[in-house]
Image: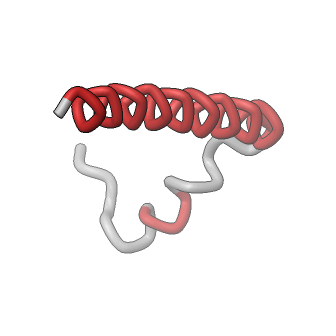
Amino acid sequence: MHHSHEGVESLAEMIARLVCDYEARQAAEGQKKSATPAALPLPLSPHSPPRT
């Protein structure tokens, strides 16, 4: 039974590492695309008129 518990802990550590790597990659990509920060919101603007 101890092995199953240890397996769960190791899985959690693996997931944590994967999440850290994923966030790091996203941050790196964000820095590369920082030149055009409005690239994502632009396609949504024509569909929804600005609320004033």
Question: Which of the 4 quarters of the picture holds residue 5?
Answer: top left
| Residue 29 horizontal/vertical position (percent) | 74, 41
Q: Which is nearer the eye, 15 or 24? A: 15
Determine whether, in the image, residue 28 is placed left or right of residue 48.
right
x 55%, y 59%: residue: 42
Q: Is residue 28 above or below residue 36?
A: above
Q: Nearer the viewer, residue 12 or 4?
A: 4
Which quadrant is the N terminus positioned in? top left
The image position of residue 40, as x and y in percent, is 56, 55
Q: Residue at x 24, y 43 (%)?
A: 52
In this rendering, position of residue 5 left or right of residue 30? left
The residue that appears at 31% across and 66% down in the rendered structure is 48
* Left or right, 34 with reference to 24: right
Q: Of all residues shown, which one is farthest toward the left?
A: 1
User: Which sits in the foreground, 41 or 12?
Assistant: 12
Q: Position of residue 14 (x, y in %)?
A: 49, 34
List x then y, in percent, for residue 35. 81, 38
